[in-house]
Image (spheres, rainbow, N blue to C red):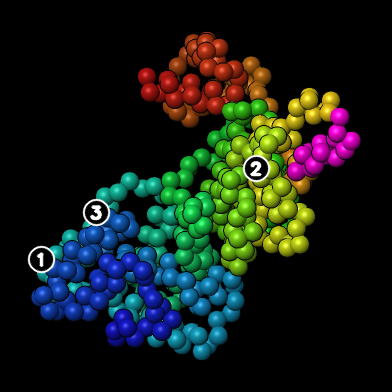
């Protein structure tokens, strides 16, 4: 079967190197194509982090990224019509053959390229790396096209397809939602203390993931207390449950309707994350945000929430001069500015820890870092560090432990 005969997976990739390798895979019995085939695989291995059996790794990557009527139906939990399955099975004959060929024609490179090609890049996201490696092994272990289909079906139903299925976090760049490759591996347990705050955040997020009613969330309060870390840690806990996160900046608020329109058609739960959100009195972008959250004609879809962090309780800066103004409707102007925060149904306060809580954070971080140090000496140095570096906070404690471990 030729690649040009594919029906459901007809446009395999926009990457010309992938297309070239797959074309040459069917012609490697001709020596003229062997060099191009192997050289192309090597380039793709570096670009897409392929490893072990490179052709199996490449096919796995192509299949998890290909958005088509079948893969999107799986993502949405729709039953697959027998007619659609028949077309998919037709295409999977091609991929099943690619995965299970022995490529004996390439005897010199057989061991290196089709057995245990080394993984050479740093693992940026171990969870996703392990997920793809596991799928690659499962596809290679199938003994029929039907088994191949069932493995893919289970994957698409669990994780979805394309960039939203493979990645956790995204940002909006030049009118397009693009993936963020480097994600912190922190978890909520890494944030010592703030148990009540984390419980409220988790409860709202889990309700959202279960399809229940949930609120937009504002985490506000003192700097360095773990507001942003709490939100980011949700990704690592709930990625396998379908949670995805889009980072948006206030200069992009005019594009929120377009962003939400794209997200609402996907079968994931999206948090639009706005970090360190605040507005000066002359900035008016908050009006776009108000309309999107609540107030516009278009209803915000049920699979999208907004989580924001801020050092300010009311988000929009107010001045004493505004209170002393001669404007007749001055109160209306003030109410407009403070009305944004009311659109966040859950508001969680983070405050600086006490001295005792600060030292408790230091102890916890030191234990996790494996520091073997006299507690009294550790506390003395932590207090000296705090005096020079901004007061009691989780951020200060973390920077202190980083300093000790580096030292």
Question: Is 94 on the left-hand or right-hand side of 313?
Answer: left
Q: Is residue 382 visible?
A: no
Question: Is 237 on the left-hand or right-hand side of 3?
Answer: right
Image quadrant holding the C terminus, namely: top left
Image quadrant holding the N terminus, namely: bottom left
Residue under numbered circle 2: 308
Residue under numbered circle 3: 118
| Residue shown at the point (41%, 78%) measured from the top left | 9
Q: CA distance from mark 1 to mark 2?
A: 56 Å
Q: Tag on residue 120? A: none
- Where's residue 24, x and y in %? 21, 75
Q: Is residue 66 visible?
A: yes
Q: Quadrant of residue 233?
A: top right
Contact, mark 1 vs mark 2 (Cβ under 8 Å): no
| Residue shown at the point (15%, 74%) measured from the top left | 33
Sequence order check, earlier mark of 3 and 1: 1
Q: Is 44 covered by the magenta stretch?
A: no
Q: CA distance from mark 3 to mark 2?
A: 41 Å
What secondary structure is marked by label 2? strand
Contact, mark 3 vs mark 2 (Cβ under 8 Å): no
């Amino acid at each position: 079967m030729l690649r040009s005969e594919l029906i459901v997976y007809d446009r395999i990739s926009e990457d010309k190197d992938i297309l070239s390798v797959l074309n040459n895979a069917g012609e490697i019995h001709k020596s003229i194509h062997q060099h191009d085939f192997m050289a192309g695989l090597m380039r793709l291995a570096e670009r897409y982090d392929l490893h072990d059996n490179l052709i199996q790794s490449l096919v796995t990557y192509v299949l998890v990224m290909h958005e088509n009527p079948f893969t999107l139906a799986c993502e949405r939990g729709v039953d697959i019509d027998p007619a659609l399955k028949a077309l998919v099975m037709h295409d999977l004959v091609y991929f099943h053959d690619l995965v299970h060929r022995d490529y004996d024609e390439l005897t010199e490179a057989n061991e290196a390229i089709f057995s245990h090609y080394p993984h050479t890049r740093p693992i940026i996201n171990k969870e996703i790396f392990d997920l793809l490696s596991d799928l690659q092994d499962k596809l290679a272990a199938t003994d029929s096209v039907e088994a191949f289909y069932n493995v893919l079906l289970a994957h698409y139903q669990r994780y979805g397809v394309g960039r939203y299925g493979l990645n956790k976090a995204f940002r909006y760049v030049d009118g397009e939602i693009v993936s963020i490759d480097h994600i912190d591996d922190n978890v909520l347990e890494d944030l010592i203390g703030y148990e009540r705050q984390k419980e409220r955040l988790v409860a709202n997020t889990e309700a959202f993931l279960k399809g229940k009613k949930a609120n937009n969330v504002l985490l506000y309060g003192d700097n360095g207390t773990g507001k942003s870390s709490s939100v980011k840690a949700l990704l690592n806990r709930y990625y396998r449950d379908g949670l995805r996160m889009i980072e948006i900046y206030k200069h992009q608020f005019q594009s929120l309707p377009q962003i939400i329109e794209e997200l609402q058609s996907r079968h994931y739960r999206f948090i639009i994350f706005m970090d360190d959100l605040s507005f000066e009195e002359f900035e008016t972008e908050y009006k776009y945000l108000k309309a999107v959250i609540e107030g516009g004609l278009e209803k915000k879809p049920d699979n999208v929430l907004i989580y924001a962090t801020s050092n300010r309780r009311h988000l929009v800066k107010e001045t004493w001069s505004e209170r002393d103004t001669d404007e007749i409707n001055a109160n209306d102007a003030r109410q407009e500015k403070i009305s944004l925060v009311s659109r966040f149904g859950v508001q969680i306060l983070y405050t600086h820890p006490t001295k005792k809580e600060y030292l408790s954070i230091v102890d916890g971080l030191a234990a996790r870092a494996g520091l073997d140090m006299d507690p009294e000496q550790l506390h003395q140095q932590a207090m000296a560090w705090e005096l020079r570096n901004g007061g009691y906070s989780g951020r200060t404690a973390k920077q202190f432990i980083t300093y000790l471990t580096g030292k």
